[in-house]
Amino acid sequence: MSEMSFEELLGDSLKTINTGDVVKGTVIDVKEDAIVLNIGYKADGIITRSEYTKDSSAVLTDLVHVGDELEAKVLKVNDGEGQVQLSYRRLQAEKSSKVIEDAFNNNTVLKATVSQVLSGGLSVMIDDTRVFIPASLVSDTYEKNLEKYAGQEEELVITEFNPRKRRIIGDCKQLIVAKKKAMQEELFARLEVGQTVEGTVKNVTDFGAFVDLGGADGLLHISEMSWGRVENPKKVYKSGDKLKVLVKGIDGNKIALRLKFPETKPWATAAEKYAVGNVVSGKVARMTDFGAFVELETGIDALLHVSQIAKEHIEKPSDVLSLGQIVDAKVVDFNAETKKISLSIKALLNSIPDEDYE
C-alpha cells in the first residue's frame, strides 16, 4: 500500500458536498458583508449579506454571532476563491414554501402578519414567502378601507399554490364564514323565546337597531325599544352600545327583540297611581288643536283637553302651554281597557279657593 499525504488523509476524513445540498455549520467569523461557517469540509462556507437577508441595510454583526449554528443551501462548491458559496435565505424560502404547500394540500389554517396593504388586497409573509390575499377574500363583508389590517395577524388558508408563477393565494373569508356559522348554530341551539340575552348594537336605522347576539343579529324594532314613544332610534342608541334584551320571537334565522320587559310595564300599577281624583304631575309631550298630551311616566300619556286647561276659554293649548312644561292636573277619567287617561287643570283650580289660588 502506497503512503498517502496528510492532505489526502484529511480529505478522506471530511465529507463531500454537492450543489443543492443542505449543510449545517458553526459561525467562525462575521464580517460586514459576509458570514463565515465551518461546515466540516475542506473549505469554509460563505454566506453573503444578500444570501442571508433581503434587507440591504441589515447589520450582520447584530443578527449573527460567532458560535451560532446555521443551516444553509450549497450554491457553489467552489466560488472561485476556494470557498463554498451558501445561501441561508433560499433555504428558509424553500422551507416556508414547503410549509405553505403542505397547508395547501391539507387545508391547514395558517397565521401571518399583514406586511403590506395593496390596492387589491393584502400581502402577508409566511417565513420568507409572500402570500397575497385578494380584497374579496379578506372578510365575509365588503371592506372599503383595508388600511386597518396593516400589521394585524390574520388567520388564512391557502387556496392556490403555484410558486413557479409566484402565485400563492390566501383566503380569510371562508374561515370567518365557517366560524360565524358555528357560532350561529350554537346560538340558535340555546336561544328561547322569553329569554334575556346580552348583545351589542351593530347598526341603527330609522326603524330600529340590529343587535349582535354573538352568532346572529336580532332586530330591536322601534316599537319595542320602550314602553314610551321613541321618535328616532339614532338619538337613543349607537353602534357599540351594550344591551340586555328580551327575545320576543324566533322565525327561522330571524330574531325579534324587545326592551319592554313585563316587570317594567308602566300600566301594571297605573290604576292605583292614576285613579280618578288623584292629582298628578307630568310633562307636556305633544300638542294638537284639541288638547295636549301629558307624559306622566315613560309609556303613559294622558290627554289634557283644551277645555280643561284653564278656567277661562282658550283657543288652542299652545296659547298657554309649551312643550316640555311640567303641569299639575287632576285625573278625571281612567280607562284601563283602552289605556286612556283624561286630566283637568280646571278641575284642580276649581278645587282651590280663589283667595288661595291668588
Image (cartoon, rainbow, N blue to C red):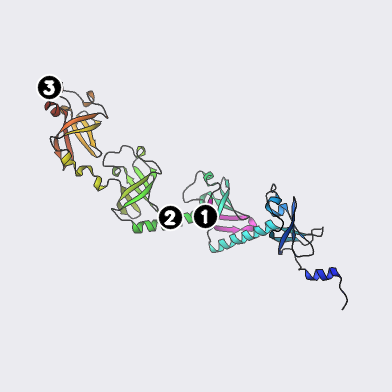
Label disc, if present, on residue 180 of the rendered structure = 2
Mark 3 or mark 2: whose residue is earlier in sequence: 2
Q: Nearer the viewer, mark 1 or mark 3?
A: 3
Task: Confirm whether the magenta stretch covers residue 154.
Answer: yes
- Circle 2 crowding by C-alpha within 10 Å: few under 14, some 14–19, many from 20: some
In this rendering, position of residue 243 left or right of residue 99: left
Q: Amino acid at mark 1?
A: Glu
Most distant residue in the right direction: 2
Mark 1, residue position = 155
User: Which of 159 and 127 lies nearest the eye of the viewer?
Assistant: 127
- Residue shown at 77% from the left, 65% from the top: 41
Q: Amino acid at mark 2?
A: Lys
- Is 138 drawn above or below residue 353 in the view shown? below
Q: Amino acid at mark 3?
A: Asp
Separation of residues labelled 1 and 3 (CA atoms): 80 Å
Residue 312 x %, y %: 15, 22
Mark 3, residue position = 354
Circle 1 sits in a helix, a strand or a loop, which is it?
Answer: strand
- Is 306 drawn above or below residue 191 in the view shown? above
Mark 1 or mark 3: whose residue is earlier in sequence: 1
- Circle 1 crowding by C-alpha within 10 Å: few under 14, some 14–19, many from 20: some
- Is 147 drawn above or below residue 252 in the view shown? above
Res 312 visible: no
Circle 3 sits in a helix, a strand or a loop, which is it?
Answer: helix
Residue 54 x %, y %: 68, 51
User: Which of 320 and 277 lies nearest the eye of the viewer?
Assistant: 277
What is the quadrant of residue 251 in the picture?
bottom left
Circle 2 sits in a helix, a strand or a loop, which is it?
Answer: helix
Residue 298 x %, y %: 25, 39
Separation of residues labelled 3 and 2 (CA atoms): 71 Å
- Give the residues drawn in magenta, as a range: 153-169
Q: Assign the magenta stretch its main secondary structure.
A: strand
